[in-house]
Amino acid sequence: MPLHTRTRWTAVVGLLWLAALLRWVDLPHLPYGLWYDEAYYGLDALRVLEGHLALFFPENNGREPLFIYLVAGAMAILGPTPYALRLTASMIGVLTVAATFRMAWTLSRRWEVGMLSGILTAFLLWPLNLSRVGFRAGLFPLAAALTLWAFTRAARRGWARDWAFAGLIWGAGFYTYLAARMTVFPIALGLILGRRWDPRRFPLRGIALFLISAAITAAPLAAYFFLHPSDFTLRGEQTSAFNSQRPFFSVAMEQAARVGGMFFIRGDDYPRHNTGSRPVFDPLLAVAFLIGGIQAVRQAPFTAIWGLVMLLPTFLSTEAPHYLRASGALPVVVLWASLGLWTLGEAIGRWIRSPWGQVAVLGGCLGLSFPWHTVAYFDPAWWAQARVRGAFSLDSWEVAHEIRSFLSAYPNGTVILSERLWAGRAEMRFLLWKQPMVRIRRLEENPPEPPPAPALVVGWQHEPVPLLRRWLPEEALLSLHAPDPWPGENVPRYRALWAEPVDRMRSNLEAVFEDGIVLEGGIARRSGRRLTVILDWLAMGKPSRDYSVFVHIYPEAEAPRWPPASPPIAQWDGGIMDGAYNTGLWQPGDRIRETRIVILPESLSMVPLKVWVGLYRWEDGSRLRVQGGEEAVSIPVEEDAASGDEPQG
């Protein structure tokens, strides 16, 4: 193989590795959560695996089938997980990079322009995001790139088999996404103009083979729509921007400004489609896109027709600009930007009279653009925002993880899930697919006989813990699991109340406080600077009020007995279960486990510790006494095996 060819193949392999790396890095966890629409694809894929085959899936506003069948194949291998769903999308994204490279090479007749197009498709935020979420729209750019490549190749070579193959590719595209229906217009216009301007390259026999092949390929789906015409029109009617009472011209001008501005000023506002409403291009690539677009209108008018028509789905619909609905324009958009970059590089290379000038310009532009897109996408601060978490239903993901953790510990345990966390949440149905131990209940209703421990009740954020408590047995060790509130919020999105067997309770202390509260057991485990304090409480009667717990931590030598002579080096104070089920809500016989994490200062990370625990009235700080006269109890301290670790979180 000649050196020149080997170098090109090496570059292509490197391109695909770059695309794969950006799409697979941390894919199981980023994006956080699982959105409703993604979950619906997963649910349909699971039904396919059960034998429910379909040409079109009418649920959830109707969806074309190809992506669902690909997801079903992945789930048959990897199981019914969100990772299988998104891995399918990422594999499609890598293939889209390869197809865009080949398409741009063919259309421009320059390998370098093809490589630039592949690189841009690999790291631009728009295609990168499409490759990491489980939406069928991510399949359409692949179909569009292959269609443009096959159509151009057939028109240039004129072979009958090329025309038939191009028709097959085009017809298959109708099974990808709703906007694929719009390809009829640029294809029809391309055939008409091609036949008129260059009949030798567009012979009637070739056109006939193209149309027949496409018709045969798309016939099953067309037959379905013929029998179910409402499914064909439903989504377009739902999302039309021209259904309002506003003047047509006013709406059209506003839509055009939004769609045109998505490349330079403001992009898609949905966190599921874009990061921080960023435009498609950074300033450098925006200039290249303009230059390439001007060139394309003169030298490759078919790409201009294709690009404009593929922007119509977002122009005609609400929520413009919408990166999913405009996804058919993506291959042409990156081709134009690549043409502009190549033209700029050539011009500067001629100006400085050095072949390395062009390389430096192209490398510099790509190097400056790369972080603008990729760093923004992987920025932890972006994913930490409450609206981004909500856009991917992170709370549903966390609830499902909590339930699976419980069932992993107690396979025969019972889970009661609030209807408020289930109704209308396709992601919950997918994440908890075929979990017979999960029961959906309205927690406000009077519960039947509670199930025996182990059991778990998961409630919505505004359902109080006493409401959850009613659904659990009296003889159980209760513990509350709740995530930290999202930024800008005051309460966790859900609360999970565990009821474990009573024999899990520690009884190494049996310290009886005033008001009938007993600290049955406790322990503190140190791992480096991280101290985990576990306290097991018992209500001998019904406490008269709420109390606060204090955990005071000292070097052992400074606090051998209570009260110590100096203030604590580290401490934690607060209501039990963060006040959600504090002592004033307890019922006689309740057993409560409280777990707290205390981050120790460096001075306490290695020395022996003394940990004192007690109760006090938060208004005046007066402490409850333990039977025997003291105000605090010392709990034992254990060293964790990983005691050299730094604190996390």
Image (cartoon, rainbow, N blue to C red):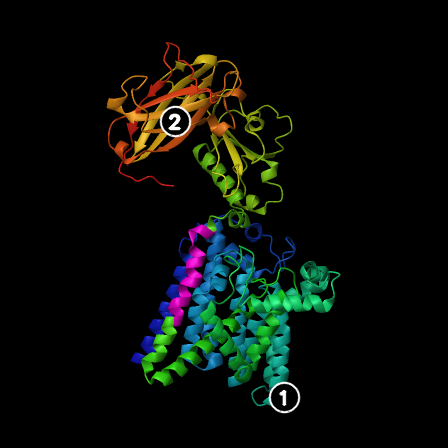
Amino acid type for the residue under numbered disc 1:
Arg
Q: Can residue 553 be seen from the camera position used here? A: yes
Residue that badge 1 annotates: 196
The residue at the point 56 percent across, 87 percent down is 201
Whether residue 220 is visible: no
On the image, the x and y values in percent for residue 31 come to 47, 52
Mark 1: secondary structure: helix
Distance between mark 1 and mark 2 Cα atoms? 82 Å
Indicate whether residue 375 is drawn in magenta. yes
Residue 42 vs 97, above or below: the answer is: above
Where residue 244 sits: x, y (%)? 73, 60
Disc 2 residue type?
A: Ile
- Residue 482 on image: x %, y %: 48, 35
Question: Which percent across, then down, holds residue 375?
Answer: 41, 59
> In terms of sequence position, does the residue under pointer 1 or pointer 2 come before the other?
1
| 96 to 348, vertically: above or below | above
Count how many numbered circles sit on residues in the image. 2
| Residue annotated with mark 2 | 534
Instruction: Indicate whether 294 appears above or below 326.
Output: below
Q: Is residue 88 magenta?
A: no
**Which region of the structure is painted magenta?**
365-382
| Nearest to viewer (mark 1 / mark 2) | 2
Comparing 317 with 610, the one in front is 610
Residue sitting at 69 percent across and 58 percent down? 238
Count neighbours of disc 2 (C-alpha within 10 A) and say few if under 14, some if 14 to 19, many if 20 or more.
some
Looking at the image, is 349 positioned above or below residue 30? below
